[in-house]
Image: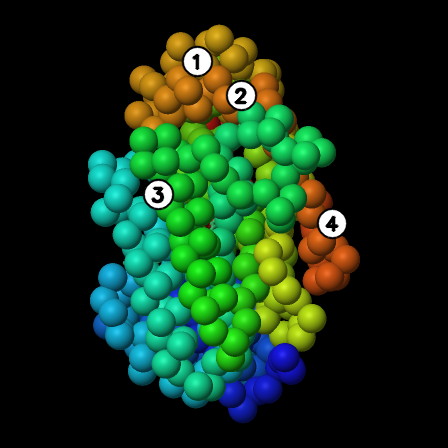
Amino acid sequence: MTMTVNKDLPVMVTGATGYVAGVLVKKLLEEGLTVHAPVRDPDNVSKLRYLNDLADKSPGAIKFFKADLLQPGSYAEAMQGCQVVFHTASPFIININDPQKELVDPAQKGTRNVLEEVNRTESVKRVVLTSSCAAIYGDNADVEKTLNGVFTEHVWNTSSSLEHQPYSYSKTMAEKEAWKINKAQDRWDLVTVNPSLVIGPGINPFATSESFRLIKQFGDGSMKAGAPRFGIGAVDVRDLAEAHFTAAFTPEAKGRYIISGHNTNILGLGQALLDKYGDRFPIPRKVMPKWLVWLAAPMVHKAMTRKIVSLNVDKPWIGDNSKSLRELGMHYRPLKESMNDFFQQLIDSGQVVSKKS
Ligand code: NAP
């Protein structure tokens, strides 16, 4: 399949109001592309301000359309004439009451709606789906069931369900749906990017993605007594935008790509902030022992069950990003740079306040 950057053809990005897609749209606009952005509310001026500001400063252009993941046919107008579809929209929320309605339906049915529209839109040649490492593993303990003790693109999450790690389950169901629809035809190809936890500054400092909620906790004192060694992978949102772009316009790109710069853990993320911010903010310095996390977790957050603690704390996340290095030419920036830039954005926007200033 020939996929070159053709600036005369627009590209479509779902979820452009979100954290991950915002930085991708920035990249596309800087490359001079026209971005079709179907959003839930194209009249919400304050929400679209960040995207409009970027378009004003870039060679590219942005056009908004109205669409909803749960409304079949709603992506038709935005997709017309597009060569590439980036499907990033999917709820990334942990605090939910009804996992089927709030997570799985928008993720899975939304993917079906977007891809059925791709089937009807002759101009589309490639779909880049923002999946997740959550579609590869459910708990860190799952690594013990892998062939070589490492999460690779060959591995699928088989441990999540509506009751346990429902967000991960929603991403698994969505990616499976995408491959099923892709395999039933041969006009367009599918590449999935599977990021680990995304960090780094977004275009909207007030984004509501779970990434923001987690990093704010390093500054608000929630972890001053210590942080768990809850294994996790991390990738910078700017590197992730590059990965989406390269996945779209590299003809040979194929299959799934783990996009993850660092195998770390929650304490490790905090420690990356210590040099620059340790004297002014209650950044965690100590390990919170697993038994204490196990005792306290359900009281701190209803989604953090004791089962999750048992299967993830003091268990490393071991991901293999070598396919992304080899085939997409990825260069991952240092963890410290991502964390410092992210934290600084939260300070500059007044969301994290130093107790000592
Ligand atoms: P986010 O900021 O919450 O963005 C989610 C986007 O999905 C928003 O634009 C939201 O639109 C849109 N959306 C949700 N429900 C929708 C619906 N029913 N119809 C239309 N649009 C809907 O989260 P994010 O962190 O950027 O996540 C974006 C993608 O990256 C998701 O697929 C997520 O699973 C994936 N991902 C994220 C991470 C991470 O650490 N952040 C890691 C791996 C994968 P509104 O603005 O209208 O709400």
Q: Is mark 2 within 8 Å of ligand 1?
A: no
Residue named by callout 4 = 322
What is the x, y in percent for residue 54? 48, 72
Q: Which mark is residue 238?
A: none
Quarter of the image with the N terminus in it: bottom right
Choose top left, top right, bottom left or bottom right for residue 78.
bottom left
**As rendered, which of 326 and 344 lies closer to the eye?**
326
Is the C-beta separation of discs 3 and 1 under 8 Å? no
Report the Cα–Cα distance between label 1 and label 4.
34 Å
Report the Cα–Cα distance between label 4 and label 2.
25 Å
**As rendered, which of 124 and 212 lies closer to the eye?**
124
Disc 1 marks a residue whose amino acid type is: Trp
Residue named by callout 3 = 93
Identity of the residue drawn at 68% across and 31% down:
149
Q: Nearer the viewer, mark 1 or mark 4?
A: 4
Of marks 4 and 3, which one's residue comes earlier in the chain? 3
Report the Cα–Cα distance between label 4 and label 3.
29 Å
Of marks 3 and 2, which one's residue comes earlier in the chain? 3
Report the Cα–Cα distance between label 3 and label 2.
21 Å
Q: Which mark is residue 294?
A: 1
Residue named by callout 2 = 313
Q: Could you classify mark 1 by the number of other residues whose Cα lies within 10 Å: few (under 14), some (14-19), or many (20 or more)?
A: some
Is the C-beta separation of discs 1 and 4 under 8 Å? no
Q: Would you say 349 lies left or right of 316 here?
A: left
Q: Could you classify mark 3 by the number of other residues whose Cα lies within 10 Å: few (under 14), some (14-19), or many (20 or more)?
A: some
- Say what secondary structure mark 2 lies in: loop
